[in-house]
Each structure stands twice: as C-alpha cells, then as structure tokens.
Amino acid sequence: MAYEEKTDWLPDDPINEDDVNRWEKGIKDAHTDLAAHKNDMNNPHNTTKAQVGLGNVDNVQQASKTDFDEHEQDQVRHITEDERMKWNGAQLSKISDDNGQPMFNLTTDFHTELQNYPTLTYFSYDKSAANAPPSGGRGFWTCSVGKTYGHVIVMTYDNKTFRKSLANNKWSDWVELENTEGAQEKVNVHAGKSDIHVTQAEKDNWNNSQLFKVTADNGQAKINLSETDDFHEIVPKNTGMVHFTSMSKTLNGPGTSVRGIWTINAAGDYGQIIAFDNTNKTYRKTISGGNWSEWIELETTVGAQSKVSNHAKDSTAHITTEERNKWNAGQLSKITNDTGGVLVSIGDADDFLSKIVQTGEKFGTFYSTGKPTNAPSALSTRGFFHFTATDSDGNGTFGYVVAIDYRNNMFTNYLDANLGWQGWNKVETESGAQTKVDKSLTDAKNYVDTNYSNQKLTILTGSNAIQDARTGGNEYPPGLTLMDIGQGNTTGYPLGYGIVKNEKYHDYRFTQYFYGTGNESNSYFDSTGTWIRHWWNGSGWTAWQKIAGFAHANIGTTGKQLLTKGELQKINFNRKIKDSHNAFDVKNNRFIAPNDGMYVVNAGLYIENYQRYTNYETSIYVNGVRYKNIAHYRVNPADPSDTTDINIGLYGAATVPANKGDYIEIYLYVGYNGDTTRNITDNPGWYNYFDITEIAGRNFPTL
C-alpha cells in the first residue's frame, strides 16, 4: 500500500506504533524508488541525441591511443585537482556588494554566521559578536562547499591581523599574524614548502578574476596618487576595494613608490591599505574611527626565504629523520639517572614521602632502604612516582607513588595538596586475593546454612499455598513466604491473579502484600499495582490498601457541543488522551473506578457566551447522583447584547471517594437570557478537559 499522510494532527494527539510504522514504511518506499531509478541505465527520461549535443560533434579523425596517452600525461598543459580547487576558491564569485563594500556585517556569532556564506566573502563585524577578535574590523572568509572546512582572516581597526580556521566543523583559536620581527620567529620554523606558495604570475592571474570593478578598464590601477595628493584625503573619498598607485613623495605614503589595494567602509572611517614597492617590500596601514596608523613593513617571500636559506646552512641546529624518530620513541622526561639507574635514592635518615615530593621532577624512579620515615615497608623498595602538578618551587602537589619490596609486595600512596598524603595501601596479589575470596565464599555459605531455612524463607506451592484470601492469618506459617495466586481468583484478593508475600513474625505481627502481575504490553495492562493489609489476631484482616500502580486518565472533547437552555446536561467527554487502566468509557462519557480509592477529579470547560444574563454550574456526579459543585459562573450585565462575545471558562476540582465499579461524570447546568445558542467550544485539551488521578489506595472509612 502506498504511503498515506496524516494532515489533521492535534497538538496533544498521542503518537502510536502504527504512526511510526507508517513513517518508516514511507521512508523505506522512497529509498527503494530512488535506488531503482539510480540503477536504471535504460534512459528512463528518454533523453535525445540533440539534448546532449551529439549533433555538434565534428566528424574528424581522432587521436591515436599513443598520442592520447602522451597528452594525458602532460602535466604542464593540465591542472591538478588541488590547483583546480585553489583557483575555484579564488575571487571567481561575488565577494562584496556592488559598491565594493562588505557582503554582510557579523553581529551575533562569528562561527554560526560565517558558515552561512560559502566560497570567498568580504565582510565586516562588530567586536561584540560572539567568538570575535577583541576589536572590530573587516576580513575575508573562504570555506569548502560543505562548509565544514574554511579559513577567515580579519584586519582590525587597531591595526592588527588575525586568522582562524575551520577543520571538520571544529574552529581553531584566533592567531595573530606578526610584523617583520614577529614573522622572523615563525619563518625559522617554516620550511621552504614550495607546494603551498604561489608565483607572482599566478597571483596576478587570480587577482585579475575580480567580478566587480577595483581597477581601470585596462586592468591597471583605478586611482593614481601624485606627489601633491594625500593618502589621508583620497582614500576616505573612494570607499570599497580600490587598486591604486602612488609616488614616492605622496603625502602620508610609505616613502616609496608603491602599488596596492585599499578597502574602506562606506563612511570612510574604517579600512586598511596594503602596498608593494619595486624593491619587493610590502607595507600596511589602517584607519580606525577616522584615525590613521603608521605604515608597517611586512615580511616578503624573498626576505623570508633568505633568512630560511641562511638558517638551513646551520647543520648543528637541525636533526635528521632518524634522530627525530629515535628521540620521539624515547622518554620525553628524565625518569632515571644518566647511567640508567634510579633517579632518586632514599636513605635511612630520609623522610620517604618528603624526599619524593622535593625531587623537582614530575616522573621518576627511586630506590629506598626499609628504614626511612614514612616508608611503605620494613624491606627495601623500588618503584616510581608521578606528579600531575607542582608548586612554584617545583615540589609535587598532586600525584601518586608505587613501591615494590623485594618480597614482591606492592604499595601505593596518593598526594592531594588539599588533603595531604592519603596513606599507604597494600595491593593484593592474585593468589592472596583468591585465598580471601575463597574464605569469604565459605563463610557466606556457612552463614546462610546456619541462619536461613525453609521455615524462615520459602515459597508455598501446591496445597501449602493459601488461595483463599479469607483464610485467617493464624493459618499461615511464620517467617517470609511467597505464594502464586491463580488466574480468576475471587476470594478477596485485589486482582484475579498475582503474587502474595507474607511477612509473619507471629499472630499479632503479620503484614501481607499483593503484587499484580499484569502485562503492560498486552491486554492485562490494567492488572498491575501493589496492595497491603494487616492481620490482628483479635480483629482479623484489615481492608486492602493500595500503595502503588495508581490509575490516571486525561480526557478531552471533540467538536462543538450544543448547550440546551435551562437544562442540566452531561458533558460529552469522548476523546482519550491518556488512560492508564482503560477505565474511561467514551460511549457513556464516564470514568469507572478500577479500584477502591480516593480520586482527584479536575474538569474544565470553555463556553461560547454573549453579553446577556448567564448562569452556569459545573458538578461532579457519582453513580448518577450529584456529588459536588466545582465551578459556578453567574453574571447579569447592565448593557445586554446577543452579538457581543464574552467567552468564559469554568474550571474546578474536588476529591471523590469511590469503590471499584463506581462511575464519575461531569454535568453542567445551562441558564441564560436571549435566543442566541450557546456551545462548548471545540478548543483542544488545554481548554476542555476531564482529568482523574487516583491518589490513595483506600476509600475514606465510613464513620
């Protein structure tokens, strides 16, 4: 059968097993149809030759297999997948708005908002945004198609540059990029990896792929600053991203002829300039809040390479791969002395624990005689210690010690800086532990055999089981006994079948429990619960009192219900929302008590009403007789109207004692003036409801 949707869900409708199975089948059918379509290689869409362009193929001689293979292996003419991804990630899509301004401004959360923008994007941000750098600014964001990998670089208004990365949907911390001196430290670590650098020709090609106008029509600078121009005046007037040139004496320039790019916000008071001169030097300048920074010279590839090359010649500063592998496989902290012996020796006059703490090492080995103070054994020991934290003097504050004497006894001790040493504990050996376990098992068997017997704890079966609940307590054996009560028992037990536990000390101290054993997943779900009663030799059995498995029901209405003027009428509660013991009869709109007990009854009605004399009374009826009035509404407005809506809600609650089989209903007296009819609204269960909760296992005693 095809999937059938359900479109009339109500907010409090229960979801049952049929609903879930129907959804699962719909999902499975959809996957089956999709898989069949994917595997259909017989042109299911009837695609023609013209549609795929075969009519445009030239009828010319094809290259030979040898020529084709030679062409295919030509790595100069072809590009690699890495190169394709790099170029596709370049400025080949729109990275700013039509005015060269940022595509968007981050205001809430750097991480969440950035992942809404794929490829390369030019943006601005507020420093108040979550996960933002400490100062506002502008930057660029580039990410993978899946938005799980990416990079962001920002230039802040206080002339700093930061970078962070997204890898496998996890963000790194912000890293501040350095100027010439700071870069030198990182250049020393950075090797000459040619596969992650680009040439000037490649950079020029990629920069020429701009999709908005940052250059003149011939690809040259859009603005050329003369010696009489002033950077501080020209730049704020030409907002967005601009390619420029300037003379060596241009006012507020870097002091040399340069080409470069500036990016400025629409107000002209926040932005950055990056410039390049003919000696291969790079300069940067920032405007923040209308205030200009000084020019900063950045490191160039040539300068960095020169420093790297000079450093590479120093063979004493480098290690071989074999050395690195050897050292990485060895210990990374000193745990022995230089000859391979123990790191710490503890003598007779030492304090064992103080000597360990004061070694100044976090991890190490030791040897101790058996005479030091606080030693774990009177015999000499060897072992190791490990501190996870130390104080300013290098003394251990948190850690442990493991010591083994020459008779193979092992001891442990733990140091907590707040609590001190926790004391030596001897670690049990396998054989020692087994001996103790064997002794414990033997002692336990002897204890049970000595202290327990069938007279004190047994299961009564066959003719020994007392099936008649009316049998007096003096007929039961002493001690703890269990009995199975057969199905359909009608002699006075709370349910027709279950388990009975007897706790009899003597004829004046006897408590009996009954446990219903209904199957919650089958038709006996309402046959669960626990009851208790007591036997007194002088007065007999007390009544059963329920102590677990109380009933509860939540019932609503469906559609509107017409209210008859001047009559007392039963409310048609007919939609089950919850019913723990299947105790509500929707045909007769009544709750039938499944057990003797005390019940809390809550009822609510929302009525379509008008501005006329009105008199409504809600009552609880038990076995067809009014028990309690729980809500009353009466009003006589001074300016009556049959068209002015004044809907009202009647809500109330009361406790109701009921015996098993008693039924509880809700009635409403309807009184009003005028001829406009009244209805109970069709609102859902939070307006119209009939809730019943069993709160006690026995009815109030009759006085």
Image (cartoon, rainbow, N blue to C red):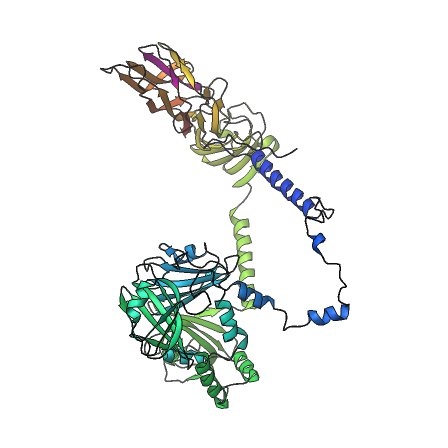
Quadrant position of residue 573: top left
Quadrant position of residue 618: top left
Q: Is residue 666 magenta?
A: yes
Residue projecting furthest to the left = 638
What number of labels is visible? Answer: 0
Quarter placement of the N terminus: top right
For the point 31% across and 14% down, the residue is 642
Answer above or below: position of 56 versus 339: above
Q: Where is residue 218 shown, x and y percent of the image? A: 46, 67
Quarter placement of the C terminus: top left
Q: Nearer the viewer, residue 20 or 197?
A: 197
Q: Nearer the viewer, residue 315 or 97?
A: 97
Q: Is residue 67 magenta?
A: no
For the point 34% across and 79% down, the residue is 248
Using residue 463 as the reference point, say whether residue 346 is left or right of it: left
Quadrant position of residue 329: bottom right
Q: Where is residue 195 shown, x and y percent of the image? A: 55, 74
Residue 279 seen in the current view: yes
Using residue 676 as the reference point, say whether residue 487 is left or right of it: right
Residue 157 seen in the current view: no
Answer above or below: position of 575 versus 196: above
Q: Where is residue 468 shown, x and y percent of the image? A: 54, 25
Using residue 268 as the reference point, say whether residue 666 is left or right of it: right
Q: Which residues are magenta?
A: 659-679
Q: Where is residue 3 shown, x and y percent of the image? A: 61, 35
Q: Nearer the viewer, residue 272 or 186?
A: 272
Answer above or below: position of 673 versus 650: above
Q: Nearer the viewer, residue 262 or 435?
A: 262
